[in-house]
Amino acid sequence: MADDSSSIEILNSTAQGRLKTLVERIERLEEDKAAVSGDLKEVYLEAKGEGFDVKILRKVVRLRKQDKAKRQEEEALVDLYLSAIGGL
């Protein structure tokens, strides 16, 4: 395995600059993701405080993201599997 100094020499200055730019963008996006995650947590806590079931709320959000046909296919498979084992 090559040492760090020889690995750095392989990247020309243009590639090094591009790499640095990409890393900085990723770092900013990770910070943004953490902020959004915190905001989402606050909204779910607010919903819970107002008496809403957070687990169900998350499921509703997930279902709304799905394509209608995909959601219907999933529901049909759940029904099929349930009937195959004799229901609930």
Image (tube, rainbow, N blue to C red):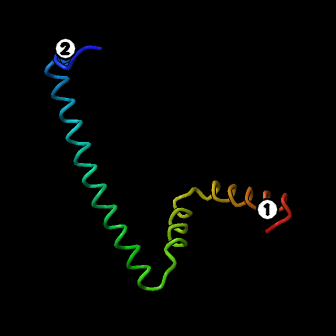
Q: Residues within 10 Å of mark 2 (few under 14, many from 20)?
A: few
Location of residue 65 in the rendering, given as x and y in whole percent from the top left corner: 51, 59
Task: Say few, some or many: other residues with alpha carbon within 10 Å of mark 1 (under 14 / 14 to 19 / 20 or more).
Answer: few
Q: How many marks?
A: 2
Q: CA distance from mark 1 to mark 2?
A: 60 Å
Give how far across and how far down residue 80 sits, in percent. 80, 58
Name which residue lies at 31% across and 67% down: 39
From the image, tell me which residue sits under label 1.
Answer: 82
Which residue is tagged 2?
6
Q: Secondary structure at mark 2?
A: helix
The quadrant in which residue 79 appears is bottom right
Q: Nearer the viewer, mark 1 or mark 2?
A: 2
The image quarter containing residue 63 is bottom right
Question: Looking at the image, which residue sits at the far left?
Answer: 13
Asked whether 43 or 2 is in front, the reply is 2
Going by the image, does 68 lie left or right of 9?
right
User: Disc 1 vs disc 2: Cβ atoms closer than 8 Å?
Assistant: no
What's the residue type where badge 1 is placed? Leu
The correct choice, above or below, for 4 with respect to 86 in the image is: above
Q: Name the foreground residue: 50 vs 64.
A: 50
Where's the N terminus, which quadrant? top left
Please tell me which residue is depicted at 44% across the width and 80% down the height of the picture: 48
Q: Is residue 58 left or right of residue 73?
A: left
Q: Residue at x 58, y 56 (%)?
A: 67
Q: Amino acid at mark 2?
A: Ser
**Occupied quadrant, residue 83:** bottom right
Residue ID at (31%, 55%): 33
Residue 46 higher or lower than 36, as above or below: below
Coordinates of residue 61 in the picture (x, y in percent): 50, 66
Q: Residue 17 appears at what percent x and percent y?
A: 15, 28
- Residue 58's disc is none
- Nearer the N terminus, badge 1 or badge 2? 2
